[in-house]
Image (tube, rainbow, N blue to C red):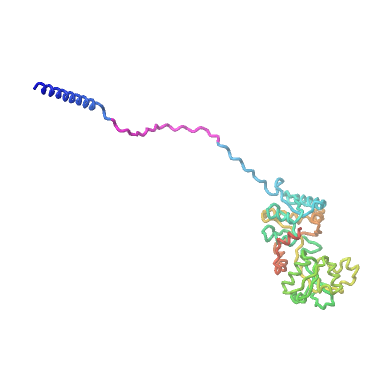
Amino acid sequence: MKTRQKGKRHTLLQISVLIVLAGFIAGCTAGTPKAMPTTTTASTAIALEPTSPGPTNTPRPTPTPTESPLGSPTNPISLAFILLPEDTSAIDAAQEVALILSEESDLSVESVIYPDFISLSTAILNGDVDLFWLQPLEYLYLHNENAADLMLVTNHLGVNAYGVRFLANVERGFQTYYDSELNESFGDPVAALQQFAGTRPCFLNPDSLPGYYAPLGLLGTTSTPIQDPIFVYDYSAIVRALYINGICDFGVSYALTGDARTAGDVVLDLPDASDVVQVVWQSDGIIPNQSLSSSPTLPLNLQVRLEEAFLDLEDAPDGLARLSTALNYEVEALKDELDQFFDPLRSALAPLELDLTAITRQTAE
């Protein structure tokens, strides 16, 4: 009995201890604060009073240089000539012409020299030249490229434009449509030229405007087919070939600036050439002489002043003589003309549909 009670007390004692311990643990647990979940708190921005910006070292823009007005000493007007380096007298004369123009126009003008048309036309198309002298086909080409405007045409041997003559031996029986006293043709040019249909001509050379392109174009405008030409490379040779008869049926020469039949070497050997070789028909002045053109970018007011200065060369001492030397071409006068002055030549050449770019470059080589 005691033993059972003793064990029960021991058991109660254990239970009591456990209760006490449990209470102690519970008390300790109750006194410990609960851990709170961690949160991210946005930081508060501190507003600062704005401060005045200090001076900045901003670089100043570099000023763009202003180009001097065209015609001023630092930006002279360029006047172009085609001359070879060995043409020293012509180059000097070109400089003298530029000086006279400067004095007459109160503009600064300088001469610029190019050795050939290829280099000159390249400069013109690039807009590097203001004024320039051109042959007829060169002008037509550059005007088509909107790079040249006609200003002045030279008077050479009394005319500003010359023509083409069609010649034949009187024994060939062609009817003449030419008045030798008036030095002009009459009647129907179509009837006159169609007489040559199916015949063989003597032409000058395949690069000549009056000795090949112009007469060939005129034959084309009158629908006159011909045989392949014979090129003899000299107008006197054309007259001699027609005089002999049998080489070609007709030939061509220049008109209005002289008579190939009365050239010194022809008259010396063939004094009756003018009687044996007759003029069948000749054109009006359809081929303009060498001319002066301006770049379309040259201001109109400067064009007017320069044109007047050129026309005043006639009154300047040796003005036209110096210009003739500079051009290697006798200039008796200058005349202002518009582009329409070239229309007769355009009409004559129209049937040929020429490649002017190729022709002018081939001629320059």
In the displayed orientation, state which residue is furthest to the left: 1
Q: Quadrant of residue 313?
A: bottom right
Side (left or right) of 309 relative to 25: right
Side (left or right) of 280 relative to 305: right
Residue drawn at the location 67% of the way across and 48% of the way down: 69
Q: How many labels does the image show?
A: 0
Residue drawn at the location 68% of the way across and 49% of the way down: 70
| Depth order, front residue of 25/112 | 25
Is 42 part of what is drawn in magenta?
yes
Report the magenta residues as a range.
35-57
**Where in the figure is residue 142, as x and y percent of width and height?**
70, 59
Residue drawn at the location 84% of the way across and 74% of the way down: 246
Side (left or right) of 312 relative to 272: left
Is 92 part of what is drawn in magenta?
no
Residue 199's place in the image compared with 78, above or below, is: below
| Depth order, front residue of 101/74 | 74
Q: Quadrant of residue 318?
A: bottom right
